[in-house]
Image: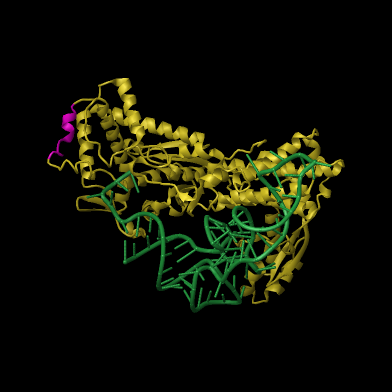
Chain colours: A yellow, B green
Amino acid sequence: MTSLDHPNFKKHFAELLRTAAHTLIAMDGTMQIELVRTKQASHGDYSCNLALQLARPLHKNPREIANLLISALPVSPYLDKVEVAGAGFINLFLKNSAKQQFLRHILQNKDNFGCSDVGTGKKIQVEFVSANPTGPLHVGHGRGAAIGASLANILAAAGFEVSREYYVNDAGRQMDILTLSTWLRYLALNNIGIPFPQNAYQGEYVITMAKQIYRAHGQRYVHRPELLLDGLLEADPETIVHTDEQLDQLIANAKKILGQDYAYIHNFVLTEQLGDCRNDLMEFGVEFDTWFSEQSLFDNGLVAHAIESLQSKHHLYRQDGATWFRSTDFGDEKDRVVQRENNQFTYFASDIAYHLNKFERGFDQVINIWGADHHGYIPRVKGALQALGLDPSKLEIALVQFAVLYRDGKKAPMSTRSGEFVTLRELRHEVGKDAARFFYVMRKSDQHLDFDLDLAKSQSNDNPVYYVQYAHARVCSVFAQWDGDMNDLIETDMEVLSSSVELALMQKLIDYPDTVESAAKEFSPHLIAFYLRELAGEFHSYYNSTRFLVSEMPIRNARLALIASIRQVLNNGLRLLGVSAPDKM
RNA sequence: GUGCCCGUAGCUCAAUCGGAUAGAGCACCAGCCUUCUAAGCUGGGGGUUACAGGUUCGAUUCCUGUCGGGCACGCCA
């Protein structure tokens, strides 16, 4: 880790301090020595509060401890000087030569720069989006998609073996409602007018699917629609289309009437919506390794298996005709039904089976990216894992808050009722993939996101996406006017890069791998977005203050080596976020 | 009503699991293009971190309470 071909100065200095600390106190290997990048140049490049932390156990003045640590510090070719400051901070100064040499490391590693092996090849699964395939993805799903995809990229860069998964809810009531909705629209095309329930799917896409069926099969699925209202006749015609019970009755009737053909329509709408969703996500730069079917859990007996397993461990009981999981034993606020009075399993039951299956597939860690409205669901899922003898801490649930769209400074209407929502596709068409991907991850994921559509579209320095991309394009345009050989840059003497701006830029580049590592460790893609914004800012400033294509070759080549390194890091970071790095703008 | 999350500059947000003088961007004001892209840069004012206590060398961060906002509280998914 500390060799020149793969230097991580932060870790290197931490090791030096660890060695020094051993001379003062017996430390177990698990004790973390935290180094922090300083905010002020006068505090050096890295700072450590170890002396302050040791003050209590050693019963000594922190500054005194700091001095003892410094005198016990092994020599290092990268360390310029060390100082004690403030209450007892140890400030470490990185040698300029170390910063300068680092550019070679970047230029040699190219696209791999920033990757590390901290994940040690552990198998990690990221499950995200997992929207019901009952209609187009909307802008809320978009954020989960952007965050999940970026996080998966970041984890892969940090050395995890990542698997991206979409859980397809193809077994539940919502799919039945969509199937019914489509069939009703289809009947209408055949001039059979049955009042369309308000709580059915209202969207235009349902009519589109009905037309497709009609075009392909004509009247084949008309059957006996007069039976559809069975059991509903006594209801008030005004309210017939309102309640859930009535909707369920309609579904039951449709299943009875259509028989085998129900499965056809069900399968058709599922395939259609899933295909649309997959296509939408692909255009958004989001792809999955696995599309996991909920229905397959039932077909393969995994739900029954999971429930039996809970049963054998005495975590289930019968009450009111239903089967309950005693989730209160595991911190949930109430027990939960896994099998209904009518013998049907609940969504929770299949979710237990799904999570059990995830760990049976051998993942060391599982991350679920959920909408924040599902937070109440966490205790029961973790509880179920614990009940099954699994370690619930291996399941990490990252909650994503919703994005609110703003247009002309006002909230854009976002009513999910009556199909009147902004779809992800519309957003992409309006602001473009790059802006959408970047804006979605610009905020900490568990924070609400105000998505300013006008800003995302604006071609100005106000727009962080263009700001970062523009920095990349600017470097490219410099190189377009240079006819030298990139290999010469790696060999060039970097010592001339000694201005404070240049040294700060190089330190910023050195920070990149640590940023990727933090983003992976904290599941925080927004750190990459912030980092890129800062790096681009420092570059633009450098660009305005300094000319690169000067006549003195040593200076020119060194400066080009620096901006080539910047371009490389901008490129690598943007790639993690799924944002393009254009050569020209 | 109960539980979870949140409250930081006029606005949108950071702050590397308790660290040094709380940082960016936008907005506002004043400047910079016969020079590699002005989609850029430079400088300036802006804060009792909602409020009140507590824990300690040290609190935006941890604990308690109050106020304000969001979400969740189904044999839905």
Residue A535, position as x, y percentages in the image: 67, 49
* Residue in view at x 66 percent, y 42 percent: A470
Residue A75, position as x, y percentages in the image: 78, 60
> How many marks overall?
0
Most distant residue in the left direction: A234
The image quadrant where one finds the C terminus of chain A is top right
Quarter of the image where one finds residue A214: top left
Relative to A207, say whether B50 is above or below: below
In magenta, the rendered stretch is A224-233
- Left or right: A319, with A170 as reference point: left
- Left or right: A165, with A100 as reference point: left
Relative to A188, say whether A38 is above or below: below
Residue B69, position as x, y percentages in the image: 41, 60
Residue A193, position as x, y percentages in the image: 21, 30
Magenta-drawn stretch contains A229: yes
- Left or right: A158, with A326 as reference point: right
Residue A456 appears in the rendering: yes
Residue A33 appears in the rendering: no
* Residue in view at x 51 percent, y 34 percent: A283
Relative to A302, say whether A19 is above or below: below
Camera-nearest residue between A238 and A145 = A238
Quarter of the image where one finds residue A579: top right
- Left or right: A28, with A286 as reference point: right
* Residue in view at x 32 percent, y 21 percent: A215
Magenta-drawn stretch contains A432: no
Camera-nearest residue between A287 and A230 = A230
